[in-house]
Amino acid sequence: MLPEARLNAFGRSGCRPLDGVRVLDMTTAVAGPVATTLLGALGAEVVRIETPWGKPRNPSSALPLLVEGPDEPWNREPRQNELAHSKRSVALNLTTDGGREVFLDLVERADVVLENYSPRVMGNFGLEWDVLRRRNPRIIHVSMPAFGNAGPWRDRISYGPGIDAMSGMSWLTGYVDGSPLKPGNFYCDQNAGLSAALSAIAALMARGRVGGQTVELAMLEGELQLIGEAMVGQQLSGREPTRIGNEHSSAAPHGVYPSAPILDAPDSWIAIACRDDDEWEALLGVWREEAVVCDPRFRTGLRRWRHRAVLDRLLCEWTPRFDPIELSERLQDAGVPASPVMGARSLLRDEQVLARQSVGGLEHPQLGLSPAPQAAFRLSETPAPPKNAAPLFAVDTLPVLREILEYSEERIAELLESGAASDRLQER
């Protein structure tokens, strides 16, 4: 069982909110690692449990080796370094009795087990909830199945884009006359990861009253929350909501318009919106196009919305004359919601991002200084910037076996020899 001092550590004042909490991270892909990365930045000791052969030896996306040392391209994959910071790396073979026993010994000394397998996998390992609870009655087990632990789709698996389609999000994403589209980046995964981290913290807060518990976060249900307006609209009107691209259901103009290139980008854009007559008048004050000012089609909000296609074409003739940053500042000063459409290169040079250090730098042993986005919130007394760059694969196997589990050198040697644990990438 956990020492009483560690059991009570959650909620005490310290350098970070989750100091004293230990999380066993069994997650893969994106959604689960988002959750555990956030918990790690908040102070939890996140022990990432990896398969000894679980990395491609030569990933096509590996970044160049910038620091003198061994050439291990699997440690330089961008997504790995984005989603594994603030963690430790331990390699265990959970299909072996030895690897399973090491994991259960860690469970005794942990607070949270977080995994995003399909429901059958933990049972296949012999690590279902009853087993975890017998070893540590205060353990929090967070699972992130695609469709939930019950229902006809229980055993189906999916990545985020599949959930985007199943949840209705892709149906609502796209242009008016186009097909459904996958939302940009890993929208479902980021949303599910944040919800899983919040759920784990909530369970930890309740542990003093109820003890350990399981937390089930079905990724499908996490994304259904994001389209509530569409479901309510369909229920009330009987009409299926349609894709509207960058348009708005009542405001016009409301869209993204081309602008003069900046930072050698192949194309640049500016977002502009007018929600009422005051903002429209403010736009006209900067636009100063007499034909538009006098056009009766644009005199009221309803007329502008009905003739939004014409209005968008006229704006597309005007905005390319300007730098998007300069034009957005002029429009904002006049009272018009506007912003340049920022790419990664622009963001890394943006004065607001730089002033707030929104993207910090972490020293990676093979990549040198590596960018790491900060958490979206700032805590005045218990700050939570990333703790450390992504660990090299299995670099913490031996320290964890020695320091947390206090195994003898003889037992550690047996685990390494049997393949139950590893301190380096293995061939399958």
Image: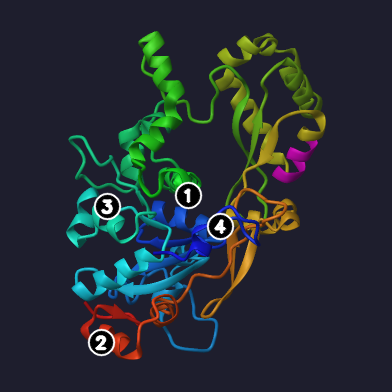
Q: What amino acid is at disc 2?
A: Glu
Q: Residue 265's quadrant in the figure?
A: bottom right
Q: What amino acid is at disc 3?
A: Trp
Whether label 1 touches label 2, CB < 8 Å:
no
Residue 424: horizontal and vertical position, in percent? 35, 82
Give the class, few, some or many, for how many residues have Cα within 10 Å of label 4's Cα (few <14, many ≥20).
Answer: many
Q: Quadrant of the C terminus?
A: bottom left
Residue at 30 percent across and 55 percent down: it is 133
Residue 37: horizontal and vertical position, in percent? 49, 59
Q: What amino acid is at disc 4?
A: Leu
Please tell me the numbered disc located at residue 204: 1
Whether label 1 touches label 4, CB < 8 Å:
no
Observer-nearest of 253 and 134: 134
The residue labelled by disc 4 is 18
Give the class, few, some or many, for how many residues have Cα within 10 Å of label 3's Cα (few <14, many ≥20).
Answer: some
Q: What amino acid is at disc 1?
A: Leu
Q: Is residue 415 left or right of residue 60?
A: left
Please determine whether, in this image, residue 68 is positioned above or below residue 263.
Answer: below
Mark 2 secondary-structure assignment? helix
Q: CA distance from mark 3 to mark 1?
A: 17 Å
Residue 165: horizontal and vertical position, in percent? 32, 36
Write the start and end of the magenta stretch as one range.
324-330
